Image (cartoon, rainbow, N blue to C red):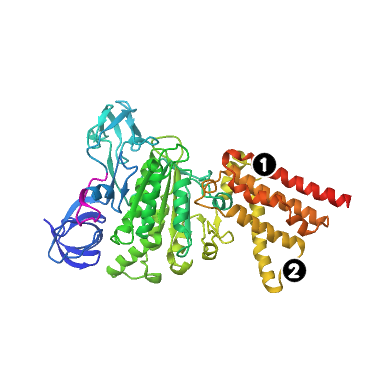
Amino acid sequence: MAGKIIKVSGPLVVARSLENPMMYEVVKVGEIGLFGEIIGINGDEASIQVYEQTEGVGPGEPVVNTGNQLSVELGPGLIKQIYDGIQRPLDVISNKYGDFIARGISEPPISYDKKWYFTATAKPGEKLQGGQRLGYVEETEIVRHWVMVPPNLSGELLDISSGTYTVKDTIGTLKDSFDEKHILRLAHKWPVRQGRPFKRKINPTIPLITGQRVLDTFFPLAKGGSACIPGPFGSGKTVVQHQLAKWADAEIIVYVGCGERGNEMTDVLIEFPELKDPKSGRPLMERTILIANTSNMPVAAREASVFTGITLAEYYRDMGYNVALMADSTSRWAEAMREISGRLEEMPGEEGYPAYLASRISEFYERAGLVIPFGSDEEASLSVIGAVSPPGGDLSDPVVQATLREVRVFWGLDAKLAYARHFPAINWLSSYSLYSDLMNNFYNNEVSELWLKNRQAALRILQEESELEEIVRLVGIDALSPKDRLTLEIARSIKEDFLHQNAFHEVDTYTSLKKQFLMLESILLFFTLAMEAIAADVPLDLILEQEVREEIARMKYHPEEEIDKIKAVQDSIRTAFDEIKTRRASA
């Protein structure tokens, strides 16, 4: 028996007399069957969060239970898809119904008609746990899709066979410990609010290389780590997220556009299909899933989009891949929670956000991690990078503070740097990474034992520059000693020649760790030799007019295959200072 609507308040619908309602159960609301989820039960009444517009829906209309929690369908065909917040394929709906999505439309998240060739690797008679591999499908040219036993199943594999199947066809049978038989298919469903299980979680010790110098050198994120990018409007959050999606050292990218403006998501949809994956040379979309839930789409679906994205990311992590998820922005998700909470008449917390804001943010970020999945003995990771858009760039905003308690990397964007055309506009004085010390062995073995020393030296110079600028404002630059004036010049060089990076330049958009190390080492070499020259009474003006400084400024534009040119810059620096010494000695 269907329940009846007794109240409609925007995206919140209250229904009475539902048959055995469950928390987070999916229901069909109204005559047109709007997609909704139960978020509160009080006696005979159920509060329902509706993920579509509720205009025209009124009391007395039916509400029907489905018996299932909000879930996503996981199987071959996810890669290259563009979904909305509740995993409806937008391109399929657009082709079938037009650009404007009518309410109540539902299409399968993955094609039920497309046939895939499945290669079985498991053998009949094997005892299998949830998450262990049954075989694989070549999903794209660069992604092998491992078909796994659903996490809530385990038992003896009775039969399995290779062949061409749709995601609904039977590929095998599993008998559990109660002698009950379960049909195995290429796809299965999983509730989005429940994290997928794994064998164990381990400490992350390898960096997620992004090719962005300020991130990789100064504030690195580990594979399996979590990061927060807060900043005011126009400070470059979305551009940083785009750069990470393009260049991050991950096999699978899940990009969630959560409540941001439609034109920003349009840039992603237009740009990503044109981009080439730097490792394989194939289109970047062949390892990317996009979730578009923009600000003009139903507000309640923003919360679902975040959990939909992270569940898809966990699925590919369980296959053994390193996955990176970008959420842009979690502030819009929090604002959706605030709106629903207000309509539920819950007691508001700080700035009107619900009292459970921190726990919801925690639920999301805690699903990141470096793990050993059930299907393999090799490490796999899920890295989460969330942009936060606090009003007016106020970092005391509850969403920022709740996020900072969960993440271990803080990339603080600065409006002043953005307006000065400094990209990425990440403030090197306020940002931090708590993963740096955990990854020392990686840098020592893979790049150089001087990596950490150079990083600390550069940060110290930038910190000293900040202190010297206060003095300059008070008494002017002429009051500074030559050493202090040199510190200001080298800090400027670090900012302009190293930290400033052009996202739209074909060479400067990405920098390998080796090139980053050589670039910073060159600047610090000039600084060290200049300090020695000043101690030997060489005039500062003579040092600063050296032509080698032009070579330092051009280092960022040397392609990776011409990295030896940066080593040649270091030789030029030594030669320049040797000539200064010789000239001074002969004088």
Crowd tier of the residue under label 1, counting other residues whose Cα lies within 10 Å: few below 14, some 14–19, many 20 or above: some
Question: On residue 478, which mark appears?
Answer: 2
Q: Nearer the viewer, residue 220 or 242?
A: 242
Q: Does the magenta segment cover residue 142?
A: no
Residue visible at 35% across and 35% down in the picture: 146
Tell me residue 544's x, y (percent). Answer: 73, 56
Q: Quadrant of the N terminus?
A: bottom left
Using the rendered image of the protein, determine whether residue 414 is visible from the camera's viewpoint. yes
Kindly identify the amino acid type of the residue bearing the numbered disc 1. Lys
Q: Secondary structure at mark 2?
A: helix
Dominant secondary structure of the residues highlighted in magenta in the image: loop
Q: Nearer the viewer, residue 94 or 294?
A: 94
The answer to whether residue 152 is above or below residue 528 is above
Left or right of 543 in this view: 119: left
Residue visible at 24% across and 64% down in the picture: 12
Using the rendered image of the protein, determine whether residue 44 is visible from the camera's viewpoint. no
Q: Secondary structure at mark 1?
A: helix
CA gap between label 1 and label 2 equals 35 Å
Tell me residue 28's x, y (percent). Answer: 18, 55
Residue visible at 14% across and 61% down in the picture: 17
Question: On residue 88, which mark appears?
Answer: none
Kindly identify the amino acid type of the residue bearing the numbered disc 2. Asp
Crowd tier of the residue under label 2, counting other residues whose Cα lies within 10 Å: few below 14, some 14–19, many 20 or above: few
Tell me residue 43's x, y (percent). Answer: 20, 64
Magenta extent: 96-109
Residue visible at 66% across and 45% down in the picture: 450
Q: Nearer the viewer, residue 255 or 181?
A: 255
Q: Does the magenta segment cover residue 100?
A: yes
Report which quarter residue 34 is drawn in. bottom left
Tell me residue 558's x, y (percent). Answer: 59, 44
Question: On residue 567, which mark appears?
Answer: 1
